[in-house]
Structures are given as structure tokens and as C-alpha cells.
Image (cartoon, grey):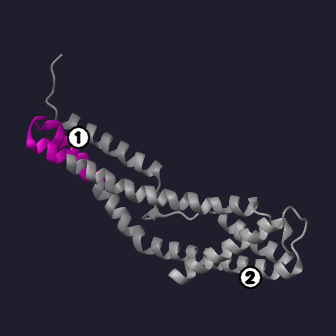
């Protein structure tokens, strides 16, 4: 795996060096076209491996993430309810607060990483478009176009195919926990007389 990463890094460095050394010339010399094409082929192959890895990870972890999110939603709701009936000055309140924060942080980590995967995958389109793709030969342009078209659909991780792992999902989970907490609190609150 490290060899693949080093190979891709060296290919990217080769492309950057070639493009920087062109100094604004209109064409890439034929001797360099072959190296550019090989480097782009390696980058496209690496992109396909990343997509396959993301698909495999999605198939493996998606059901687990759904279970994790559902249990976390319930735990957060009941933890908030416990905090609302516990004395603020007690040690128990401090322990429950720490547990609540750690549960939120755990969910946040999953959502943050899912959001990062989506952003980086979407940035590939911009990176290809901002490159000097128009200076390459037709075969290389077609490879870059295919990669760009595929990158228009960003890689997204989900929780059970119901919700994308993103920062918006994290906010929804926190809001949902708060809403369920309010319902639970109102059903268990003593009736007040008018």
C-alpha cells in the first residue's frame, strides 16, 4: 500500500514538474506526452481503487453505522433526561455530562470523516478542471474526462443507506435527541394547574 502511495506521489510530482517546466508553452513536447499519459493512467487507476475501497467500506460498515446512530440517538435522549432530573452539584451529574459529551464526540467523528470523504471526492473534479488538461494529447484528455465525470458523483458514506455521514447528519441527530428528550420530559412532567 505504501508503494502505491509513493508511486502516486511521484506521478503527481512528475506532472507538476513537467507542467512547471513548460513555462507557458502551448504544447507539451511529444517526448513528455508519453510520461504525462502514464502518470495520468496511474492517477486514474488510483482513483478507481479509492472508489472500490469506499464501496467495500460502505457495504461493510453501513449497517453497523445505522445501529450505532439509532442506539446513540436513544442514549443521548435518555442521558439528557437523566441530566434534567439530577442535581447539578452532584458527582453523578458531572459523570453523566462527560458521558454525554463523549457520545456526541463519537458520533461527530464518524460524521466528520464522512463529510471529509465527500468533500475530497468532490474536489477531484475541480482539480482536473484547473489542470492544464487541454495541453495533453487526446487519449490523456479522454482519461481525465472520464475521471472527472465519475468524480461528479462524490463518494458518500451512509448509515444503513438512510442518512449520509456528514456534518448535517450530526446536527440532525443532536436535534432529534433534543426533540425526543422534550417529548419524554413533557410526558413525565407533573401536570401543572392553571
Indicate the secondary structure of the residue bearing disc 2. Answer: helix
Q: Is residue 78 magenta?
A: yes
In this view, the residue in front, 103 or 21, is 21
Indicate the secondary structure of the residue bearing disc 1. Answer: helix
In this view, the residue in front, 179 or 51, is 51
Mark 1 lies on residue: 184
Q: Quadrant of residue 192?
A: top left
Identify the residue at horizontal 56%, vertical 65% (top origin): 155
Marks 2 and 1, the one that precedes in the sequence: 2
Magenta range is 73-97
Q: Position of residue 176 (x, y in %)?
A: 35, 45
Mark 2 lies on residue: 38
Residue 71 against residue 41 in the figure, above or below: above
Q: Quadrant of residue 150?
A: bottom right
Q: Is residue 150 magenta?
A: no
**What's the mark number on residue 8?**
none
Amino acid at each position: 500500500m505504501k508503494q502505491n502511495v509513493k508511486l502516486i506521489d511521484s506521478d503527481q510530482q512528475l506532472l507538476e514538474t513537467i507542467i512547471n517546466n513548460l513555462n507557458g508553452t502551448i504544447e507539451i513536447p511529444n517526448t513528455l506526452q508519453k510520461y504525462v499519459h502514464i502518470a495520468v493512467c496511474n492517477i486514474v487507476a488510483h482513483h478507481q481503487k479509492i472508489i472500490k475501497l469506499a464501496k467495500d467500506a460502505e457495504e461493510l460498515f453501513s449497517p453497523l453505522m445505522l445501529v450505532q446512530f439509532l442506539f446513540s440517538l436513544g442514549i443521548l435522549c435518555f442521558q439528557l433526561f437523566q441530566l434534567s432530573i439530577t442535581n447539578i452539584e452532584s458527582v453523578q451529574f458531572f459523570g453523566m455530562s462527560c458521558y454525554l459529551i463523549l457520545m456526541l464526540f463519537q458520533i461527530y467523528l464518524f460524521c466528520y470523516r464522512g463529510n471529509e470523504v465527500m468533500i475530497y471526492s468532490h474536489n477531484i473534479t475541480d482539480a482536473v478542471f484547473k489542470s492544464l488538461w487541454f495541453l495533453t494529447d487526446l487519449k490523456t484528455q479522454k482519461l481525465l474526462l472520464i475521471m472527472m465525470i465519475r468524480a461528479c458523483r462524490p463518494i458518500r458514506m451512509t448509515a444503513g443507506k438512510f442518512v449520509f455521514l456528514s456534518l448535517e447528519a450530526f446536527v440532525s441527530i443532536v436535534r432529534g435527541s433534543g426533540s425526543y428528550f422534550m417529548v419524554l420530559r413533557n410526558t413525565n412532567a407533573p401536570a401543572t394547574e392553571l
